[in-house]
Image (cartoon, rainbow, N blue to C red):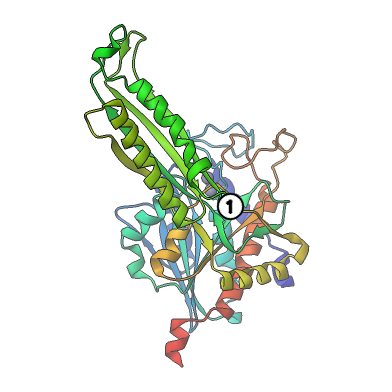
């Protein structure tokens, strides 16, 4: 694949810097959506945006063959950028997770596919997904009905920038790549009162303390020791001054899991412990649960993973491919494969660091106000990886379309 090794990044570099200057947080990616839609229309793709949700879906049809979906997420984070790069954020948000690299890499890949369209046949569906950072963007985009205007994919492929992998290399793993993440907000209500007369109140602070400690027995006493899981209480809010016991308390429980069984076990255990501790305290009102964040597992289909790995090893070289450990960070990419009922595969690519932040210790990675990828390495690697995998998938994916054509 020597034709792909020299990716000219300059026009893409200008695009990248534009996206980096104008970051928009989840579900507010209005400018980003408009810019992407214009770029794709200029390139002659069938482009759809939704009335109800940000993001873009576009189809590039090129004859008979499989339908390969390529997904990039487009939202930024509510972080104030500290990198000092020339093209620093002009909004209160920041592309601190590299989604600007993802957008640029997918557009660069479309350009490569257009330039080489005589060498492949099939259909590419480009998915520019909003609101990955809050875990509900993929679901919202699917629910908006936007995919009704596009062919149903046979496979879904995606990638994420990484400050941890060596620059210019790629990595992934078969089966579960990224944890499921769930957040429940729990509200307790009871009679507050004078801190000097706790026997006449329901002390929600003491109740919450018991719940928090007991929740820590889920991983240590209930999850099988050969499984990996995390349960954390990230927030507790109650009270105003020291001599009043509050009448309402809220806390959030964040859990990570690598199988649906463990995920369900944790959810049952959290609810059981909260309800039982509330009863043990004599709380009259039922605790209230709200499932406020829900990231699916990100599972790489084994057969498709083998195809993707082979394409990446051919494009870079075998030493440039790392089999990574499962990641406790989460990602809602898995919603697409599940929703379309087709395999999906996801991988990471090493971006290096921009010279402005290259000497920082520890080295900044995603979600840091100092994370700035090296633009040339990031764009070139993202385009090369996604193009190589897309071309391989177009040539090797069994398709309902080609099956119908037989
Ligand atoms: Zn992120
Ligand atoms: Zn991200």
Q: Is residue 118 above or below residue 111?
A: below
| Relative side of 394 to 349, left or right | left
> Which residue is at 40% across, 34% downward?
252
Q: How many marks?
A: 1
Q: In this rendered view, identify the residue nearer to me: 12 or 403.
A: 403
Residue 21 is situated, as x and y percent measured from the top left of the image, at: 54, 41
> Would residue 111 be found to the left or right of residue 361 on screen?
left
Residue 370, percent from left and from top = 63, 35
Image position of 51 with respect to 266: above or below: below
- Check disc 1 and report its element: helix, strand or loop: loop
Q: Is residue 234 visible?
A: no
Task: Find residue 399 and report its horizontal and vertical position in percent.
Answer: 48, 81
Q: Is residue 4 above or below residue 141?
A: below
- Would you name the residue on which mark 1 appears? 226
Near-viewer residue (293 or 71): 293
Q: Is residue 160 visible?
A: yes
Furthest-right residue in this view: 319
Pointer 1 residue Cβ closer than 8 Å to ligand 1: no
Name the one closer to the observer, 208 or 130. 208
Quadrant occupied by the N terminus = bottom right
Residue 361 place in picture, x, y as percent: 72, 33
Please identify the residue farthest to the bottom as the structure is shown: 406
Res. 205 image quadrant = top left
Residue at image position (26%, 27%) is: 283
- Residue 168 falls in image quadrant: bottom right
Packing grade of label 1 (10 A; few <14, some 14-19, many >=20) is few
Decide if residue 294 is on the left or right side of residue 160. left
């Amino acid at each position: 694949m020597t034709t792909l090794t020299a990716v000219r990044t300059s026009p893409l570099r200008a695009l990248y810097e534009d996206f980096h200057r104008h970051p928009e947080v989840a579900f507010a990616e209005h400018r980003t959506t408009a810019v992407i839609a214009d770029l794709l229309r200029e390139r002659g793709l069938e482009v759809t945006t939704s009335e109800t949700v940000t993001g873009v879906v576009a189809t590039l049809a090129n004859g008979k063959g499989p339908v390969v979906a390529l997904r990039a997420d487009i939202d930024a984070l509510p972080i104030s950028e500290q990198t000092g790069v020339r093209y620093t954020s002009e909004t209160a948000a920041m592309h601190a997770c590299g989604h600007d690299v993802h957008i640029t890499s997918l557009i660069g890949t479309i350009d490569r596919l257009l330039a080489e369209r005589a060498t492949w046949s099939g259909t590419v569906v480009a998915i520019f997904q909003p609101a990955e950072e809050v875990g509900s963007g993929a679901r919202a985009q699917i629910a908006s009905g936007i995919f009704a205007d596009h062919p149903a994919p046979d496979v879904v492929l995606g990638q994420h920038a990484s400050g941890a992998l060596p620059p210019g290399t790629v990595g992934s793993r078969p089966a579960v790549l990224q944890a499921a993440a769930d957040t429940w907000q729990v509200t307790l209500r009871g009679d507050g009162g004078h801190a000097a007369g706790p026997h006449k109140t329901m002390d929600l602070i003491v109740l919450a303390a018991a719940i928090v400690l007991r929740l820590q027995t889920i991983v240590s006493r209930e999850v099988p020791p050969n499984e990996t899981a995390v349960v954390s209480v990230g927030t507790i809010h109650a009270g105003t001054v020291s001599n009043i016991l509050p009448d309402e308390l809220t806390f959030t429980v964040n859990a990570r899991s690598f199988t649906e069984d463990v995920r369900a076990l944790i959810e049952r255990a959290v609810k059981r412990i909260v309800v039982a501790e509330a009863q043990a305290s004599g709380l009259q009102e039922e605790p209230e649960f709200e499932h406020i964040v829900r990231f699916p597992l990100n599972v790489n289909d084994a057969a498709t993973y083998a195809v993707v790995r082979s394409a990446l090893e051919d494009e870079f070289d075998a030493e440039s491919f790392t089999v990574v450990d499962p990641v406790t960070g989460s990602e809602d990419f898995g919603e697409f494969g599940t929703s379309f009922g087709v395999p999906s595969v996801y991988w990471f690519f090493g971006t290096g660091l921009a010279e402005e932040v290259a000497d920082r210790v520890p080295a900044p990675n995603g979600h840091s106000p100092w994370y700035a990828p090296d633009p040339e390495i990031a764009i070139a690697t993202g385009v090369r990886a996604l193009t190589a995998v897309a071309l391989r998938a177009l040539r090797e994916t069994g398709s309902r379309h080609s099956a119908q054509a037989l």
